[in-house]
Amino acid sequence: SRRRHTRLQGDGSSDVCSSDLPEPLERQLLRLARRSADGFTLNDALLALDPPHLTDVAGLRQAIDRMQHNHLLEVGNDARGRIVYREP
């Protein structure tokens, strides 16, 4: 299979494969929501994101809020009363 490459701006000497770049946050959150019918908690998301060190809680909450506003995620509670996010 062919791999698409993206040239990093400002570094004309190195090619970076686009598959090596981090997956967009919203796409990771949707994948996480689809993995479990019960949804995911904020803590689940923080542990599952790649790369985790680039994601802060405030940025994660903003992404989830945008996704709720766009009807890509809904919020609810699980059996233990925790706030969970799932696909509508």
Image: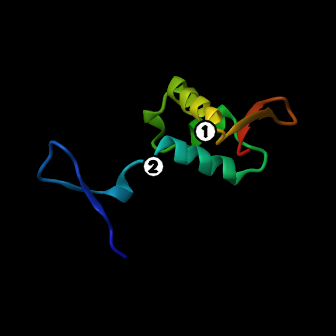
Q: Residue furthest left?
A: 13
User: Is 62 on the left-hand or right-hand side of 9?
Assistant: right
User: Quick one: 51 or 76, which is closer to the camera?
Assistant: 76
Task: Tell me the amino acid under the disc marked 2.
Answer: Glu
Please report whichever mark, 2 or 1, sits nearer to the chain's N-terminal start.
2
**Local secondary structure at mark 2:** loop
Quadrant that contains the N terminus: bottom left
Q: Residue furthest bottom?
A: 1
Q: Position of residue 60 (x, y in %)?
A: 54, 31
Residue 18, placed above or below residue 56? below
Mark 2 residue crowding within 10 angstroms, few (<14) / some (14–19) / many (20+): few
Q: Position of residue 79 (x, y in %)?
A: 87, 36
User: Quick one: 80 or 30, which is closer to the camera?
Assistant: 30
Q: Position of residue 5 (x, y in %)?
A: 27, 60
Residue drawn at (54%, 26%) of the image = 57
Task: Tell me the amino acid under the disc marked 1.
Answer: Ala
Q: Position of residue 78 (x, y in %)?
A: 83, 36
Q: Residue furthest front?
A: 70
Residue drawn at (72%, 42%) of the image = 86
User: Is 50 on the left-hand or right-hand side of 46?
Assistant: left
Mark 1 residue crowding within 10 angstroms, few (<14) / some (14–19) / many (20+): many
Residue drawn at (58%, 39%) of the image = 47
Q: Residue furthest top?
A: 58
Q: Can you tell which mark lies on residue 88?
A: none
**Local secondary structure at mark 1:** helix
> Which residue carries the number 2 mark?
23
Q: CA distance from mark 2 to mark 1?
A: 14 Å
Q: Give the label, 2 or 1, closer to the camera.
A: 2
> Which residue carries the number 1 mark?
45
Residue 74 position by quadrant: top right
